[in-house]
Structure formats: C-alpha cells, structure tokens
Image: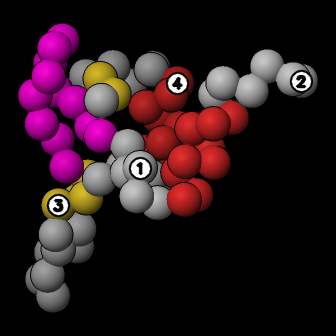
Amino acid sequence: HLFAGDADYAVAARMKGQGFLVKRPGNSSSPAQDFEGFCWPGPSNYPDFCDPRMRREWAKLFDFSS
C-alpha cells in the first residue's frame, strides 16, 4: 500500500499521477475514483499490480543501473 495522507510522498504522487492505483468502480454519473482503504499509518491507496504498465513503473523504483 501507499500512504495517501502525505501529498509530498513522491512514490504515491507518481503512481496517482499516472493513474496506476486501484479504482473504485464508476458509472454513468460518477467516474471511477482511486480506492482508499486504511492500513497503518492511515489512509492508503493501492498500486494496481494487474496493470503491466504499473508493474514496469514500479520496477523502475528498484533499478539501480543508472
């Protein structure tokens, strides 16, 4: 999970900005919204690991070759 309570948390902002978080279902009158749950230390968003684009972006966080 990614802590959603800190707008300065770069990893969360990066994933949110690219639309790579798990979404609540939308409908014709309300678009899909980022799912927010609770996990220590508070409000949390969850990366959508079913999306291959998100997995590639996540892998970049662990690429120490550059």
Q: Nearer the viewer, residue 26 or 39?
A: 39
How far is mark 1 from mark 2, CA to CA? 24 Å
Q: How crowded is mark 1: few (under 14 residues within 10 Å), some or many (20 or more)?
A: some
User: Which circle, 2 or 4, is nearer the viewer?
Assistant: 2
Amino acid, disc 4: Ala
User: Which circle, 3 or 2, is nearer the viewer?
Assistant: 2
Lower position in the chain sequence, tag 2 or tag 4: 4
In what element is the residue under mark 3? Answer: strand
How far is mark 3 from mark 1, CA to CA? 15 Å
Mark 2 vs 4: CB contact within 8 A: no
Q: Mark 3 points at which residue?
A: 24
Above or below, 60 relative to 3: below
Q: Does the magenta stretch include residue 63?
A: no
User: Which circle, 3 or 1, is nearer the viewer?
Assistant: 1
Amino acid, disc 3: Arg
How far is mark 4 from mark 1, CA to CA? 18 Å
Q: Name the residue under label 2.
A: 66
Q: Which of 30 and 66 is in front in this view?
A: 66
Q: Where is residue 51 in the image (x, y as percent from the top left)?
A: 46, 60
Q: Mark 4 points at which residue?
A: 10
Magenta part of the chain: 35-46
In what element is the residue under mark 1? Answer: loop
Q: Name the residue under label 1.
A: 49
Above or below, 24 relative to 60: below
